[in-house]
Image (cartoon, helix red, strand yellow):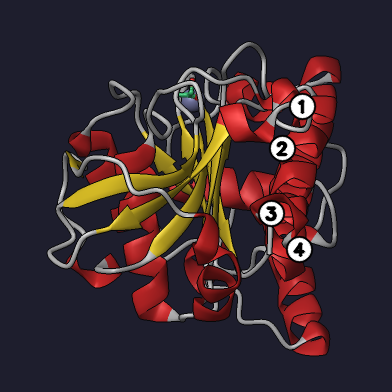
Amino acid sequence: MKVLEAEFVKGFIRMCSDGWEQGWHERNGGNLSYRMKDEEVAAVEENFVPGEWKEIGTSVPGLAGEYFLVTGSGKYMRNVPLDPEDTIAIAEIDQAGEKYRVVWGLKNGGRPTSEFPSHLMNHEVKKAIDPRYRVIYHCHPANTIALTFVLPLDDKVFTRELWEMATECPVVFPAGIGVVPWMVPGGRDIAVATSKLMKTYDVAIWAHHGMFAAGFDFDLTFGLMHTVEKSAEILVKVLSMTDHKRQTIQPDQFRALAKDFHVTLPEKFLYEKD
Ligand code: 2HA
Ligand code: ZN
């Protein structure tokens, strides 16, 4: 089968254009990766032309031998649907989890996203928790980023404030949201900090930069990002009108919601406010 005919590739490309249409991918901002299933590798491997092995820049032994569909460094999300063979790639991880090689795509050269170390370390953590996790998505959504200038950079505050903005939020991200303070992007340190949060959460906010989300498939991961950013948009509107909410969802109301919707909401987020 041709790579571009495979359903997982079509889903990946659609997610890139959906993110662009949301305004989350100015210039070459943001990146996406997908850990391929064995049957998906088998269906397209006849097209593979392996390139040189290169250092990942970090170690991911839990991903040895895995294949990833990933956006290219410096590539624009808005161009992915127009020319996927130039903008995305399939990369294979070596048996030590130290190196990768491009086996398809990036036909005009280049390498996987500059955030490949963060993506892979997040994938490694998520795969160990539940092998159904396959998607890691990074974007630059304006409202979430705006909040990192006014809210304390604290998991508890971000989670609680975003939960309060839309009743579906605690059901969509019951584990909460992690926050990484400002760090230099692209390197191992920010990858380590993010993957540590991914042990607990499916969402990590990078202060003054953007957001990472993890999920089982494209719909769930895009939907998660969309829900968090929508909630952030409502909070930005509220904070633009007033610094005081006249009414909001209360801790006991969250507890009642958790019971009916069969989710566990950690008590650390249901603190009493002054
Ligand atoms: O340009 O978003 O964090 C890609 C990025 C880097
Ligand atoms: Zn970024």
- Identify the mark nearer the N-term, 4 or 2: 4
Q: What is the distance, in whole Å, between disc 3 and disc 2 at their CAs?
A: 11 Å
Q: Secondary structure at mark 4?
A: helix
25 lies above or below 188 = above
Question: How far across and down, in percent of the image, does residue 230 sit?
Answer: 81, 39
Classify residue 151 as left or right of residue 226: left
- Helix, strand or loop at label 2? It is helix
Up-down relation of residue 26 to residue 84 (above or below): above
Which residue matches tag 4?
7
Which numbered disc, 3 or 2, marks the residue closer to the eye? Answer: 3
User: Which amino acid, by three-letter code, is at mark 1?
Assistant: Trp
Give x and y (percent) for residue 42. 53, 75
Query: How far is the residue under mark 4 from the one under mark 3?
Result: 5 Å
Name the residue that disc number 3 marks: 9
Q: CA distance from mark 2 to mark 1?
A: 6 Å
Asked if marks 4 and 3 touch (Cβ < 8 Å), the reply is yes
In the rendered structure, which amino acid carries the disc numbered 4? Glu
Earlier sequence position, callout 1 versus callout 4: 4
The mark closer to the camera, 1 or 4, is 4
Q: Residue at (56%, 36%) from the top-left corner?
A: 88
Query: Is residue 55 in view from this perspective?
Result: yes
Query: In the rendering, which numbered label is found on residue 16?
Result: 2
Give amino acid for label 2.
Cys
